[in-house]
Image (tube, helix red, strand yellow):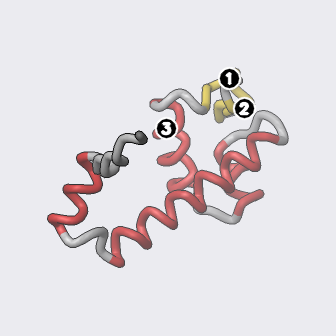
Amino acid sequence: MAEPAQPKQKKPIQILRERMGGLSDRMKSYIKDHRFVRSKLTEALKKGQRTVPEIAAETGIESQVVMWHLMAMKRYGTVQEGTRKGEFFLYMLKE
């Protein structure tokens, strides 16, 4: 005789979201924008090493925003700093 199926356990984050009423539209938009920027930066860096101004020119994203995201990506180990090219460091994806 087969045992009855156990109900699927909810993860703590799911429980928290249900209690808080889910994500606000503002937060959803914020997350969507971040994912878009990160994907554009990743696409640019897949083509090779780039400086912040080169990435900004290629993606159409402001240099300050590119730098902010690169520093976050560097902190979390997806991007690394390379050698200098003029006044700027080259950035590349970590293998």
Q: Which mark is residue 82?
A: 1
Q: Residue at x 65, y 34 (%)?
A: 87
Tell me the kind of residue under disc 3. Met
Reading the image, the residue beneath label 3 is 71
Q: Relative to 15, is 95 above or below?
A: above
Reading the image, the residue beneath label 2 is 86
First in sequence: mark 3 vs mark 2? 3
Q: In the rendering, at what x and y percent does residue 24 appear? A: 30, 74
Name the foreground residue: 50 vs 18.
18
Q: In the rendering, at what x and y percent does residue 31 appear? A: 44, 62
Mark 3 vs 2: CB contact within 8 A: no
Question: Separation of disc 3 and disc 2 at Cα?
Answer: 19 Å
Residue at the extreme right of the image, as rendered: 47
Picture quarter containing residue 1? Answer: top left
Tell me the kind of residue under disc 1. Gly
Q: Residues within 10 Å of mark 2 (few under 14, many from 20)?
A: few
